[in-house]
């Protein structure tokens, strides 16, 4: 049987050493590529068909595809990323997504990073952050309907740095990050010492989670999910984590198109 989900991913460019980072540290590109391959293998192990878009050396952050689109059902809002250096990333991803979904655009002065958007059931929670402005949030609401905006603490890059959806009712949320009362969802707690692991990719009952966070791995297992551990040392140096490395799409439209 063909997988029913696809994932758009993008190669790690050699210029990844110049990726944006709050606290720059030397990045090992060869290791980053190995870890990206491990991530793609985990997606495949979760039953997802993985597509890999070629890297663009002019876009050091291009492997963080999540920030370039927000996908709900059969529509993708192509974002206008908050960091000017990342705006050149969107055309190639729009081209890849066109095979799956209908594309909707976002224009100046709106800015929004997909990492600030978390869909839980029919609600999209969106971080009001240094990357995502009021016009971006308004456009998101215009396109998708129910949106709940949450102010990000200044040290948090994106909403999904501290939480991520497990299914339509439950989220992983790092303690001491954002109040649980912001969400109409059940909370699976991640201790503050493991905040990085609150960003995980759930595919049905399978969850891709960063290696090295035993408390979170156990919490995910206890919630009834199967964890798939992947290494993240190099993307972490560029303020990246797991959800940011893919865009998950249903394959049904593409299959219908032939
Ligand atoms: C950036 O600062 O934009 C990239 N270095 C990291 C983006 C990570 N994206 C995400 O978590 N959604």
Image (cartoon, rainbow, N blue to C red):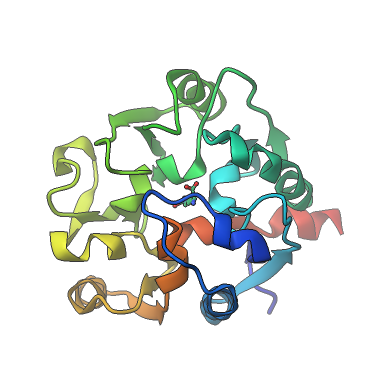
The image shows residue 134 at horizontal and vertical percentages of 43, 19
Asked which quadrant contains residue 211, the reply is bottom left
The image shows residue 122 at horizontal and vertical percentages of 41, 39
Q: Is residue 224 above or below residue 82?
A: below
Q: Which residue shows up at 51% across the image and 28% down it?
A: 140
The image shows residue 78 at horizontal and vertical percentages of 64, 37
Q: Nearer the viewer, residue 182 or 67?
A: 67
Q: Is residue 119 above or below residue 64?
A: above
Asked which quadrant contains residue 229, the reply is bottom left
Apparent side of residue 254 relative to residue 121 in the rendered image (left or right): right
Q: Nearer the viewer, residue 108 or 246?
A: 108
Q: Which residue shows up at 15% across the image and 64% down it?
A: 193
Q: Which residue shows up at 57% across the image and 76% down it?
A: 47
Q: Nearer the viewer, residue 134 or 170?
A: 134
Apparent side of residue 257 relative to residue 104 in the rendered image (left or right): right
Q: Which residue shows up at 40% across the image and 72% down it?
A: 233
Q: Is residue 163 visible?
A: yes
Q: Residue furthest right?
A: 258
Q: Is residue 241 visible?
A: no
Q: Nearer the viewer, residue 131 or 191?
A: 131
Q: Tell me the quadrant of the picture where the C terminus can be found.
A: bottom right
Total tally of numbered discs in the picture: 0
Asked which quadrant contains residue 188, the reply is bottom left
Q: Tell me the quadrant of the picture where the N terminus can be found.
A: bottom right
The image shows residue 90 at horizontal and vertical percentages of 69, 42
Apparent side of residue 208 relative to residue 222 in the rendered image (left or right): right
């Amino acid at each position: 049987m063909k997988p029913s989900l696809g994932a758009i991913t993008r190669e790690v460019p050699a210029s990844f050493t110049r990726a944006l980072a709050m606290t720059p540290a030397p990045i090992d590109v060869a290791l980053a590529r190995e870890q990206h391959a491990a991530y793609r293998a985990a997606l495949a192990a979760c039953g997802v068909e993985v597509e890999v878009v070629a890297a663009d050396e002019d876009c050091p952050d291009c492997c963080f595809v999540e920030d370039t689109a927000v996908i709900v059902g059969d529509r993708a809002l192509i974002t206008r990323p908050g960091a000017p250096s990342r705006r050149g990333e969107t055309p190639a991803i729009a081209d890849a997504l066109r095979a799956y979904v209908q594309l909707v655009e976002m224009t100046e002065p709106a800015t929004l990073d997909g990492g600030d958007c978390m869909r839980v059931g029919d609600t999209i929670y969106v971080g009001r952050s240094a990357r995502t402005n009021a016009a971006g949030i308004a456009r998101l609401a215009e396109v998708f309907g129910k949106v709940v905006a949450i102010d990000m603490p200044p040290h948090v890059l994106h909403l999904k740095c501290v939480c991520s959806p497990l299914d339509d009712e439950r989220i992983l949320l790092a303690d001491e990050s954002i109040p649980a009362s912001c969400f109409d969802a059940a909370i699976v707690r991640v201790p503050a010492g493991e905040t990085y692991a609150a960003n995980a990719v759930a595919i049905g009952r399978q969850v891709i989670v960063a290696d090295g966070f035993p408390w979170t791995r156990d919490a995910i297992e206890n919630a009834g999910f199967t964890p798939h551990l992947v290494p993240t040392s190099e993307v972490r140096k560029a303020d990246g984590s797991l959800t940011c490395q893919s865009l998950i799409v249903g394959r049904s439209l593409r299959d219908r198109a032939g």
